[in-house]
Image: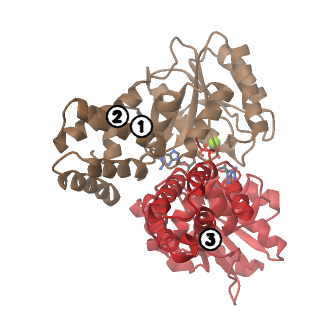
Chain colours: A red, B brown
Amino acid sequence: MVFEGLADKLQGALQKLKSKGKLTENDVKEVMREVKLALLEADVNFKVVKEFIDKVKDRAVGQEVMESLTPGQQVVKIVHEELTALMGTTHSKITFASKPPTVIMLVGLQGAGKTTTGGKLGAYLKKLGKRPLLVAGDIYRPAAIKQLQVVGGQLDIPVFSLGDKVSPVQIAKEGIEHAGKHGNDVVIIDTAGRLHIDENLMEELENIKKVVIPHEILLVVDAMTGQDAVNVAENFNNRLGIDGVILTKMDGDTRGGAALSVRSVAQKPIKFVGMGEKLSELEPFHPDRMASRILGMGDVLSLIEKA
Amino acid sequence: TKTRQGITARVDQVLKSYKKVDEELLEEIEEILITADVGVNTTMEIIGKLRNQAKERKITEVENLRGLLKEILADTLDLNKSHELNIQPLPAIILVVGVNGVGKTTSIGKIAHRMRSQGKKVLLAAGDTFRAAAIDQLEIWGNRVGVDVIKHQEGSDPAAVVFDAIQAAKARKIDVLICDTAGRLHNKTNLMNELGKVRKVVEREYGEASKEILLVLDATTGQNAIQQAKIFKEAVDVSGIVLTKLDGTAKGGVVLGISSELDIPVKLIGVGEGMNDLQEFKPNDFVNALFGDE
Ligand SMILES: Nc1nc2c(ncn2[C@@H]2O[C@H](COP(=O)(O)OP(=O)(O)OP(=O)(O)O)[C@@H](O)[C@H]2O)c(=O)[nH]1
Ligand SMILES: Nc1nc2c(ncn2[C@@H]2O[C@H](COP(=O)(O)OP(=O)(O)OP(=O)(O)O)[C@@H](O)[C@H]2O)c(=O)[nH]1
Ligand SMILES: [Mg+2]
Ligand SMILES: [Mg+2]
């Protein structure tokens, strides 16, 4: 079921249309229904799907499609184009402060991959010639500090910690001072995982933000997230004004519809994707690949090319 | 919380705004199920049953439809025989598996706490030798709830850890041995094979023990959870599910799909990060929560 892509279903729908030559509005409707189901199966949020389908429908019942010789393929092409456009452009960049250190703060739900991604980002920036410092701002999760220290040790990147008895706000503040003194030009703050509805812990993040004024607040999102991804993104974005998203665990076989949901509610770029547990497995985000993946349509594209 | 009220309000609004059971109403219910991650296929099946049974039983009042729907949903879950942990007769071994970051180690801490409060002798095995500080994390949980942890060094063979833990459990006359494993995505064949090896050790070395193989699923996960359940079941014959992070706003509706397609019972649910935040799974409560009635 999960792997039965849009391609098969569309092929069926298109087969029916072939004999007709021209598309009617009803034909488009039928094809769009398949697209809608494919998006839902890929975990794209319900509301986001509805808006998207309406938009595509408008274009698809237009002249360019109805009168083309391969109307079905035209529709799929439009779907893919619009989806890619919705994903935004390639944006795997970190905004560096004009006056160092650049401060990056990682936030997100429990277990999303913040600590691991902190290490990956550190490694990535080190390659760019930066001198990152990791700051252990999670004082709650058992062994969270140790985890970051092990990660830092593997990468030969220093880790700043004040233990788990000091407030994360204070840790962040002193971490930045420490960076200033030790010539670290990027500070990556790891924070504890939290629910977007946890009033106290969300306030804690606001307080960290107030004190350290990060240049980048990045929301770390598990690519396997379901319909709730929009609520998560909305809450974190409303409270903190995030600057971008990192999608993790993309090495799995999830369609990753959460990407579209998050992107569409927060309107912030997806900057990187996590492709594995190893600290080198961080990649730039490719909007077109993501669009194909969500639709499950490696084959659909070649279908279009043939047309 | 706000979000939950939002959903409750929406359901009631939907039901109130319809006088008769009709296709439009069914479509709105379909929407509610989809937004709870129930998935397209399972939702269609449920709506189909709802439509047919409403016709058969001549249900036209909206209020009665709601009852019927809950019945159908609870049935889907109840097909599962038992929601009890399979630990009788003692001694027992529980192997905990799942993808990365779902809450395996935390759930083990909670289960250990629960068993200990029931007066059982518990031992933990640090079978995640891969993730940074995974062993330390389990040890902190062990200290917190007052049970010992059998461990090797980071990077060592998890099957060897479990082997040692089983010998220790026998020697110390432990009631329940709970084994942690590293998170792994189900599409990584080598890692799934490694898990198969651990399971073989359990079978070979601890024949006399009752066995429970728990798959931990994150309630926030969408349709991929079905794939996780399918492949973990094939690899290690999962006997129960722990559904975590239900204290968020996600509804975990995907377990309906898993129940109807795979027949693996949900046994426990996680509702927070503390050691008491573990509950038995009650199908009816779950269905209510799916609808926002609490
Ligand atoms: N396969 C895979 N696993 C990942 C990826 N990123 C993180 N992980 C794993 O996901 C799990 C959770 O990662 P963490 O970095 O501990 O997540 P976190 O958000 O810091 O978790 P909390 O601090 O508990 O909220 C670990 O097992 C990581 O190894 C990824 O891109 N791919
Ligand atoms: N809100 C909430 N958080 C939970 C729950 N269960 C676990 N967590 C949190 O989720 C994060 C990951 O939990 P772990 O127990 O480390 O997950 P894991 O599956 O062992 O992770 P890996 O070993 O890295 O694969 C931690 O921050 C936990 O505190 C739950 O029921 N509710
Ligand atoms: Mg962390
Ligand atoms: Mg673990």
**Horizontal side, residue A35 vs residue A270: left or right:** left
* Distance Cα–Cα, label 1 vs label 2: 6 Å
Instruction: Kindly indicate whether the residue at mark 2 contacts the one at mark 1 (C-beta within 8 angstroms).
Output: yes
Instruction: Say which residue appears at 44% left-offset and 73% top-offset.
Output: A238
Establish if B272 lies above or below A281: above
**Mark 2, other Cα within 10 Å: few <14 / some 14–19 / many ≥20:** some
The numbered mark at residue A81 is 3
SS at mark 3 in the image: helix
Residue for badge 1: B45
**Mark 3, other Cα within 10 Å: few <14 / some 14–19 / many ≥20:** some
SS at mark 1 in the image: helix
| Both marks 1 and 3 on one chain | no
Tell me which chain the residue with mark 1 is part of. B
SS at mark 2 in the image: helix
Tell me which chain the residue with mark 2 is part of. B
* Distance Cα–Cα, label 1 vs label 3: 32 Å
Ligand 2 within 8 Å of disc 2? The answer is: no
Residue for badge 2: B49
Instruction: Say which residue appears at 51% left-offset and 28% top-offset.
Output: B264
Depth check: A115 or B150 in front?
A: A115
**Horizontal side, residue A114 vs residue B47: left or right:** right
Mark yes or no: residue B272 visible: yes
Mark yes or no: residue B113 visible: no
State which quadrant residue A122 falls in.
Answer: bottom right
Ligand 1 within 8 Å of disc 3? The answer is: no
